Amino acid sequence: MGPGIQTKPSGSLLLAWQVKDKHCLVIGGGDVALSRIHHLIRAQAKITVIGGTSEKGINAEILQLNKEGYIYKLVERDYESSDLTMYEKTKLDLGGEDCYVYDLISSDHYEEIDRQVKNEVFANVCCCIDDYKLSTKIYYQCKFLRLPVNIADKPPLCDFYFGSMFNQDNLQIMISTNGKSPRLSKLIKDNIAKQFEGIDLNKAVENLGLIRSRLRETIVLDDDLVSIDTRMAWIKKLTDFFTLKQWSNLDLISGDQDRFERVDRIIKYFPEYPPREFDNFKLAIYNQCLE
């Protein structure tokens, strides 16, 4: 076992789950469902909500989000088992007797598979109801259908958790206690947020991401691991030149005809480096004379 790894690890696998333009199902219409919807909106998912018909009714903010177009489909009735497959229409025909003959999949099928994944199958299911018996049944229905599911407030019945999120568009930081203490997750998130007050982390991410992408586009080296490592080492060292606040205070996109001219001035130093003193660095990228 590698260094630093506990004998009995107890954490979960934290991932950035790409659900953009994919169907996601939320069962329930209360405050917990609303919190799940906010997470899915940030991820640009196609959100279907089965809001129920309880006496409390559907949360007013959910109704407003639906009115504003953030929700793909709002169903104002109680859950039905068929909801889990409501968008499924077709089954991929591989030309064999066994529908599970995966070896028959070829590039001819890729487009159809992509279409089905985006349009017919739920990427995940979030169950946010206070009916323990029904929510347990929904969990096992999802397992039968191989659908990842989160049963609110029941960690053993969750394939994934919703931790506390610190968001600045491109930058996301998730804090998770594996469902044991959501309140503690929030306290830690709030502490992190205080440390970054006054810093536009999203701008810093955009600036460094632009340098990285332009470096790959404009510096053509052999497409081998040594060349890739050379570029990675260069961008890592450059990133460490300045603080987060300094990176967030730069405007690398030019309003002129050549909108990438500023970032390209940085890359022209490769494999050497631009000035390490921040004021001189700014003068260099803005094409101003050094005094």
Image: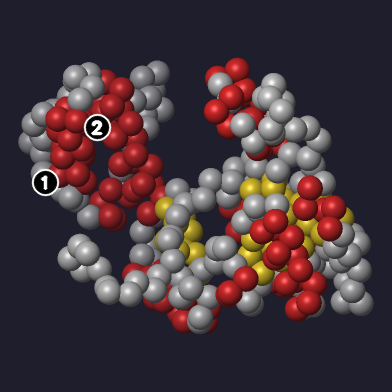
Secondary structure under tag 1 reads loop
Residue 71 to residue 218: above or below: below
Badge 2 crowding class, 10 Å Cα cut-off, few under 14, some 14 to 19, many 20 or more, is some
* Position in image of residue 28 (x %, y %): 78, 67
The figure's colour scheme reads secondary structure
Which image quadrant: the C terminus?
Answer: top left
- Residue under numbered circle 1: 277
Secondary structure under tag 2 reads loop
Give whichever of 282, 70 is nearer the camera: 70
Report the side of 70 relative to 291 (left or right): right
Residue 3 to residue 124: above or below: below
Q: Quadrant of residue 125?
A: bottom right
**Residue furthest front as drawn:** 97
- Residue under numbered circle 2: 286
The residue at the point 17 percent across, 35 percent down is 229
The answer to whether residue 183 is seen in the rendering is: yes
The residue at the point 28 percent across, 55 percent down is 244
Sequence order check: which comes first, mark 1 or mark 2? 1
Give whichever of 187, 134 is nearer the camera: 134
